Amino acid sequence: MKKIAFIGLGHMGEPMARNLLKNGSRLIVSDINQEKLKVFKGFGAIVAEKNFMSEQPEIIITMLPSGKEVRQIYESYIFPHLKSHQLLVDCSTIDVETTRQLALKAQDKKAYMIDAPVSGGVAGAEAGTLTFMVGGNTQAIEQVKPILLQMGKNIIHVGETGNGQAVKICNNMMLAIQMISVAEGFALAEKLNLPASALFEVASKASGQCWSLTQYCPEPNLVPNSPANKNFAPGFTTAMMLKDLRLSQQTAQNVGTATPLGAMATMLYTTHYNLAGGQLDFSSIIRLIKGQFGQQVQ
């Protein structure tokens, strides 16, 4: 069994690391939260706050908030001690440029870095059903695949390192736009005295169909697992969606691509975040569209 270092025990990282332990992995954990480290020590993990490389892990997995933290961990703790046999797996959602720069530095040390951002939210992390969008060397991915399958259900190889981040950013920009469109449809239906159930019955079988409608509907009691059924308790928070949208706009600007609906979605989610905070599910954007914060979106 390979020895794995897991850095970052946040909302996503904690359940992912728990699943590795449940599946019998030899795990080293590192995080700034001392209480979480104590919990994982009780589970049988090796605790190493910053000197995790001294434990000689064969695979190093990072799950961190942004490119800034990923770069800091790599440059301060990983690269100075990296050996060619060690594999780097970044499951964070960060900018493509940082990912590719770090991958080149790893390559200079004759090691491989792959990016493997995830889809599925906290619920998917807890259930071990995440989808990994993986970019990098095919042989390295084959070595890591059994580890990823302890945390998820689907592993999709999307090309070179950095492509995982690219797919995640594009997908989530599309998702945000689609969720806003669904929210607008239900907001208009309400003003027309059209029952939400009637719109759902037609649109879910017609050309308005999309995942945001049929699997994650922002109107309550129309689909089984919608956060709307639980007052928008999050599966994927507004803060996380806004982060991904901002990455999409930064990336679009860097490569000179126009994404006008992506830009509008970013503006709307920024307004929603400022009014409602970031901890509700991203589908709660319907509250902004319906004017439930005392102002109507124009």
Image (tube, helix red, strand yellow):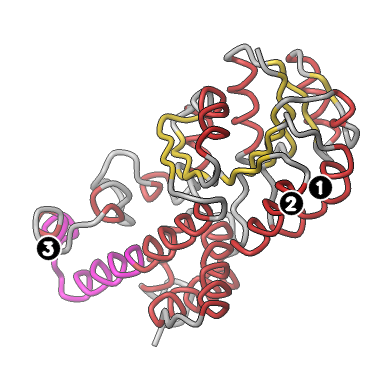
Q: Nearer the viewer, mark 2 or mark 3?
A: 2
Measured along the vertical axis of the image, is residue 128 above or below residue 207?
A: above
Q: Mark 3: give few (<14), some (14-19) or many (20+) Cα within 10 Å.
A: few
Q: In this figure, which residue is indicated by the disc labeled 1?
A: 73
The residue range painted magenta reads 178-200
Tell me the quarter of the image containing the N terminus. Answer: top right
Label 2–label 1 contact, CB within 8 A: yes
Q: Nearer the viewer, residue 298 or 246?
A: 246
> What's the residue at 49%, 27% (across, down)?
128
Circle 3 SS class:
loop
Measured along the vertical axis of the image, is residue 197 above or below residue 173?
A: above
Q: Earlier along the polypeptide chain: callout 2 or callout 3? A: 2
Predominant secondary structure, magenta span: helix
Q: Earlier along the polypeptide chain: callout 3 or callout 1? A: 1
Amino acid type, mark 1: Ile
> What's the residue at 23%, 74% (across, down)?
188
Measured along the vertical axis of the image, is residue 116 above or below residue 177?
A: above
Amino acid type, mark 3: Ser
Q: Nearer the viewer, residue 294 or 117?
A: 117
- Residue 188 colored in magenta in the image: yes
Q: In this figure, which residue is indicated by the disc labeled 3?
A: 207
Q: Nearer the viewer, residue 36 or 223?
A: 36
Q: In this figure, which residue is indicated by the disc labeled 2?
A: 70
Q: CA distance from mark 2 to mark 3?
A: 41 Å
Tell me the quarter of the image containing the C terminus. Answer: bottom left
Q: Nearer the viewer, residue 252 or 282?
A: 252
